[in-house]
Amino acid sequence: MTSSPVVWQAIEAFVVLNALLVLVAYVTLLERKFAARMQSRIGPYYVGRPHGWLQPIADALKLMLKEDVVPTASDRGVYNLAPIVFLVPCLLIFATIPFAPELGVADLNIGVLFFLAVSSLEIVGLFMGGWGSNNKYALLSAMRAVNQIISYGLPFIFVALVPVLLAGSLQMSAIVAAQQGLWFVAYPGLGQLAFVLFLVAALAAENRVPFDILEAESELVAGFRVEYSGMKFALIQLGEYAHMLGTSFLGALLFLGGWSGPWPAWFGPIAFLLKAVGIFLLVTWVRWSFVRIRVDQILAISWKLLLPASLVLLLATGFVVALRGAGGA
Amino acid sequence: MSGYLPVLIFAAFIVGFGVVSLAVARLLRPHRPDDVKLANYECGAEPIGSAWVQFPVGFYLVALVFVVFDALAVFLFPWALVLRAAGMGAFWVMAGFVGIIGLGWLYAYREGVLEWK
């Protein structure tokens, strides 16, 4: 793949990006339908009868036609740049994820490291948005967000290293290959604990309920994006959902075996997509079932429970791997 | 390094998408500003002063503890890759290192740095 001509690589990147944008748009529809059903509503229905399947397109068009309001008090440069700075890492995390054998932008040998490093860059754009708005809600939200994301970034990294240890590689395709026999979530003891910790840390890193203090509607209106409107708002929303979907893909790849499983090879990519959407729906399910928790509780869970637990889990996995040596996990 | 070229192309496409969609929106959308519309949103009340004020030191304490563990994470990546070949020796070295950092964590815990006030 790496030796193929630049044109082909560009075409592939272009196709992947467009497929992702469509997927992210329809994931928002899926969440709205799912949430509606949980609350005995129907959800989007009229735009694209019978199930609102044109709703995401209508939303995008509407946001594109909306006036763009830039508050006079804001720091214009920072404010205008923030949506793009936020969007780029949120979509770039997909660069190293192979969606099927040999199908992806670049299957780097540092895939997992690249994902973790790039996804942590999103707080730069987020903070730029919150600071540049010169709005009290937005700035409070941005401070809370940075605080929370760096707190949960650590357990997230440590837990993501558990499958890396078991597979002995950072390359995404190699991690999938190591799960041909047994998905890492089924690895006795360690796998289940790691998966649960991964889900909790992912929820917090994505700022989803019950960890959504940064957009807490009842106190901070809409959080760091309160001053944004029109297409800039759309880009921020898009980035947020892309990040969520990317993390779901990572979870499906690290713990649920990616495309591997007891089915014919052609079904593998579809199974991978279904697993990722399954994790996304689990996150949505949590969102509509739990209440928001307080700032001090959020930080206590991370620093006093998740951080030591994930480190101990990582060391325990390391012990098992080192003990079994070249025999393989 | 040729393996990173697709990543660069992908990043360029993402930036392009963002810029083009903002530019298209600029051509299509209305532009009718007025003073009240351009004021900061504070639930209808008139905004008082700037939002750029001093912040509680607690935020910086969390950031400091974060840097310590982030440095630990840097060492964990290569360790995770070679552990199988390097065997138990490498495991005990890392266990000792995590133990030392753990003492630091315990100290921070007892000093109340991990409490949010």
Image (cartoon, coloured by chain):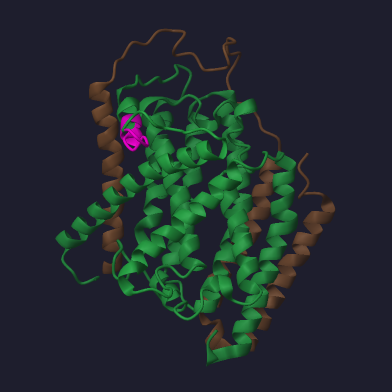
Q: Residue at x 75, y 56 (%)?
A: A304
Whether residue B36 sits left or right of residue B65 in the image: it is left
Decide whether residue B62 is among the magenta residues.
no
Looking at the rendering, in which quadrant would you find the C terminus of chain A?
bottom right
Q: Residue at the location (30% across, 46% down)? A: B14
The quadrant the N terminus of chain A occupies is bottom left
Residue at 55% over, 52% down = A282
In the current view of this chain or complex, which residue is farthest to the top?
B35
Which image quadrant for residue A142? top right
What colour do you see for chain A?
Answer: green
Based on the displayed image, in which of its 4 quarters is residue A314 positioned? bottom right
Residue B83 spot, x, y in % from top left? 56, 82
Rendering quarter of residue A200: bottom right
Number of labels in the image equals 0
Q: Residue furthest bottom?
A: A327
Task: Please say whether residue A53 is one of the residues in the magenta stretch.
Answer: yes
Locate residue B40 relative to residue A95 in the image: left or right. right
Instruction: Tell me if residue A115 can be seen.
Output: yes
Q: Nearer the viewer, residue B23 or A75?
A: B23
Residue closer to the observer: A129 or A300:
A300
- Towards the viewer: B71 or B47: B47
Q: Position of residue A233 (x, y in %)?
A: 41, 30
On screen, A304 above or below A85? below
Looking at the image, which residue sits at the far right?
A: B110
Residue at x 64% of width, y 54% of height: B66
User: What is the magenta range?
Assistant: A49-59
Q: Is residue A226 left or right of residue A239?
A: right
Q: From the top left corner, tell me how far across and down residue B30 is, in percent.
A: 29, 16
x and y percentages locating residue A115 in the rendered image? 44, 59
Which chain corresponds to the colour brown? B
